[in-house]
Amino acid sequence: MEALLGQLAVYAIGLSGLSLIVGYRMIRRGRRLWHHRFMLVATAFAGLFLVFYLLKWGLYGSTRYAGPEAWRLPYYGLLLLHTVLAAANGPMIVVLLVHAFRGRFDRHRRLARWTFPIWLFVAISGWIIYLVLRVYGEPAGGVRF
């Protein structure tokens, strides 16, 4: 079950990133309705990621990096940046959606210029972290059922 929750989480954030890219392309082509739809899908997948990740973390604890020593600092640097940006991105997405739903597209656009690359970085770095821990991870403990 632990592996399944991890896989569901990583696929959800990956699909969120893909939906984000498609939504971006739609607005660049002037297709607002499709932009709106894909961004809502991206948000839904990001929400699913959060649910799966928190379930995995709550039930099984975290996974510790146990790979080569030379990779330790770059790995933890990426993890720290990923975590800080992911935590900042959540509220940014909520505000972005509020601006869009209220028709404040000038504010929405200004904030989206920051939110889009951060969100995309978080999705890509989440995959990198998952793949590194899949090879070099070991359980760090947690509640077992």
Image (cartoon, rainbow, N blue to C red):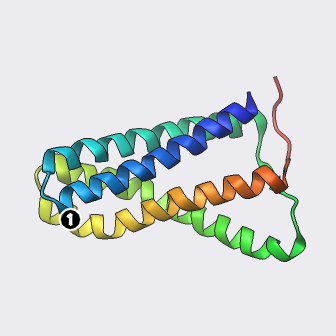
Residue at x 14% of width, y 51% of height: 31
Place residue 91 in its image quadrant: bottom left
On screen, residue 141 versus residue 134, left or right, reads: right
Q: Is residue 38 above or below residue 72?
A: above
On screen, residue 121 versus residue 43, left or right, reads: right
Residue at x 15% of width, y 44% of height: 33
On screen, residue 27 versus residue 135, left or right, reads: left
* SS assignment at label 1: helix
Image x and y of residue 20, in percent? 36, 53
Q: Is residue 22 above or below residue 76?
A: above
User: Quick one: 86 or 71, which is closer to the camera?
Assistant: 71
User: Quick one: 21 or 121, which is closer to the camera?
Assistant: 21
Image x and y of residue 87, in percent? 51, 58
Outermost top residue = 145
Q: Amino acid at mark 1?
A: Arg
Quarter of the image with the N terminus in it: top right
Total number of numbered discs in the rendering: 1
Circle 1 residues within 10 Å: few <14, some 14–19, many ≥20? some
Residue at x 35% of width, y 56% of height: 21
Place residue 83 in its image quadrant: bottom right
Image x and y of residue 55, in percent? 64, 33
Q: Name the residue tied to disc 1.
A: 109
User: Quick one: 134 or 141, which is closer to the camera?
Assistant: 134
On screen, residue 107 versus residue 137, left or right, reads: left
